[in-house]
Image (cartoon, rainbow, N blue to C red):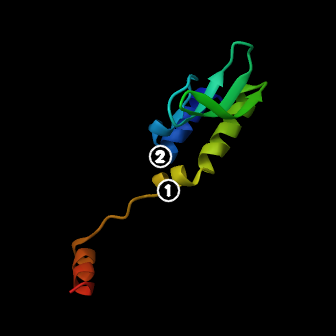
Amino acid sequence: MNREQLKEQLSSLGVPSQVYSLSGGLPNEQYVLSQEPNEQWAVYYSERGQRSNLRIFDSEENAVQYFLDTILHDHVIKASMLPKKEVSDQDEYRKNDLFE
């Protein structure tokens, strides 16, 4: 998988685009995939202008796979990907019944 395929995969999974960057840099509170000048790939968490949990890869494929695994194992991101349950009028009625 390459960076473009990763972008499509993240979108299809419903991962909010605000939690990651696929173009490097030091965005605040985002997971980052970066192609480094030395032809290596970096994956890290960017917060307050700092890189943390930095991992370096020699191939785009390995970096992309690690990035995807990292995103999908983050419990906060996982929770934001859960489908939202629609509340029906009947559910609302039951809820009101319980609290009266």
Tell me what residue is drawn at x 74 percent, y 13 percent.
38
Query: Looking at this view, is 25 or 12 the one in front?
Result: 25
Asked whether residue 76 is in view, the answer is yes
Mark 1 and mark 2: Cα distance apart in space: 11 Å
Tell me the element at label 1: helix
What quarter of the picture does the C terminus occupy? Answer: bottom left
Q: Position of residue 85 (x, y in %)?
A: 37, 64
* Relative horizontal placement of residue 65, taking residue 16 as reference (left or right): right
Q: In which quarter of the view is residue 61 placed?
A: top right
Indicate left or right for 5 with 14 as reference: right
For label 1, the residue is 79
| Badge 2 element | loop
Q: Residue at x 46, y 37 (%)?
A: 17
Quadrant (top left/top right/bottom left/bottom right) for the N terminus: top right
Count neighbours of disc 1 (C-alpha within 10 A) and say few if under 14, some if 14 to 19, many if 20 or more.
few
Q: Is residue 1 in sight in this rendering?
A: no
User: Hey, which quadrant is residue 96 in on the image?
Assistant: bottom left
Q: Position of residue 98 (x, y in %)?
A: 27, 86
Mark 1 or mark 2, which has the lower sequence index?
2
